[in-house]
Amino acid sequence: MTTSLKESVGRYGVWSVELRSEDPDRRGELDEAVAELEELGYGAVWLGGNSTADHAAPLLGATRRVVVGTSIQSVWQQDADTTAAGFTEVDAAHPGRFALGLGVSHGPLVKDYRRPYSAMTGYLDELDKAGVPADRRVLAALGPRMLGLSRDRAAGAIPYLVTPEHTAQARQILGDRPLLAPEFKVVLESDPARARETARAYLVRYLELPNYTGNFLRLGFTEDDIADGGSDRLIDAVFAWGDEARIRERVAAFHEAGADHVALQVVTANTGATLPRKEWRTLASLLA
């Protein structure tokens, strides 16, 4: 019997934009890093940015068990037939280990952005015709309509930049069966000022994107929370920082709210440039 995606990914995974690098000179480094993540016990690796099956394939080849998913592939990035062909090729080589994470991206980032919900439903229609199974795809869903689509036409949802409160609401919409795998950011720093400085420097780019700011407002944050790089209240809600006990407590809050899996993104002053391998080891140890 085929293992479901929900069972395969386990309780924790790593979300990383660094692992999707296309630099051939870094191939050995990336393969070594993802193999270590598997040995550390992470159940999944989620590739940030506009990632595709081409980014996932070499990482799957360097590992034996871990699931590798796109988080996300934008539906505006490539047509559904190309996506289906990529999925089929990778799934044939590594059965059941590739998760196709799809999203509608953001208006400010996409030329001719329009009717995102309709764009996603049309894309899923094309994937259905091409034979991409619904139980191997997940959606980057924030609002109720997209969460409903994650429930009805995918294996579940991979919400990005959310809180435990959002997770509780998402679980109510999804029901018990679908995978709910929120992304959560971690700064391994106990000093409040330094931790928030690192977090705020990373968060500021997302506060220009209406999908995220709209979701924050739905969750009860205010325009003041969103201004000037984010209030301490917002920073503390969407990042875990502090000592080991505090970080464990913050991650556990997502599971208590209904998450099956938490995709942990380590944020440092060099996020996007260097692999945070020391931090991944520390995080694996404190969550063991």
Image (spheres, rainbow, N blue to C red):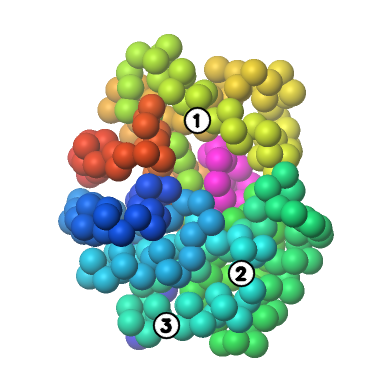
Q: Name the amino acid, label 2.
A: Gln
Where is residue 202? Give x, y as percent: 50, 30
Residue drawn at 76 percent across, 59 percent down: 116
Residue at label 3? Answer: 89
Q: Choose the circle earlier in sequence order: 2 or 1.
A: 2
| Disc 2 target residue | 78
Quadrant hosting residue 274: top left
Between the residue at mark 3 and the residue at mark 2, the CA separation in whole angstroms equals 16 Å
The answer to whether residue 85 is above or below residue 212 is below
SS at mark 2 in the image: loop
CA separation, marks 2 and 1? 27 Å
Q: Which mark is residue 202?
A: 1
Q: Secondary structure at mark 1?
A: helix
Under mark 1, the amino acid is Tyr
For residue 232, say whether it is visible. yes
Residue 109 in picture, x, y percent from top left: 68, 48
Q: Which residues are magenta?
A: 157-170
Task: Specify whether 143 is left or right of 265.
Answer: right
Mark 3: which amino acid?
Answer: Glu
The front one of 231 and 244 is: 231
Query: What is the crowding at mark 3: few (fewer than 14 residues within 10 Å), some, or many (at least 20)?
Result: some
**Image location of residue 183, percent across then percent down:** 48, 46
Label 1 packing within 10 angstroms: few (<14), some (14-19), many (20+):
some
Where residue 177 appears, as percent x and y from the top left, is: 53, 67
Q: Nearer the viewer, residue 264 or 144?
A: 264
Q: Quadrant of the C terminus?
A: top left
Side of 192 where 238 appears, left or right: right
Q: Is residue 269 left or right of residue 158?
A: left
The residue shown at (51%, 75%) is: 135
Question: Residue, x 55% and y 41% (percent of image)?
Answer: 161
Q: Earlier in the sequence, mark 3 or mark 2?
A: 2
Report the side of 37 relative to 210 (left or right): left
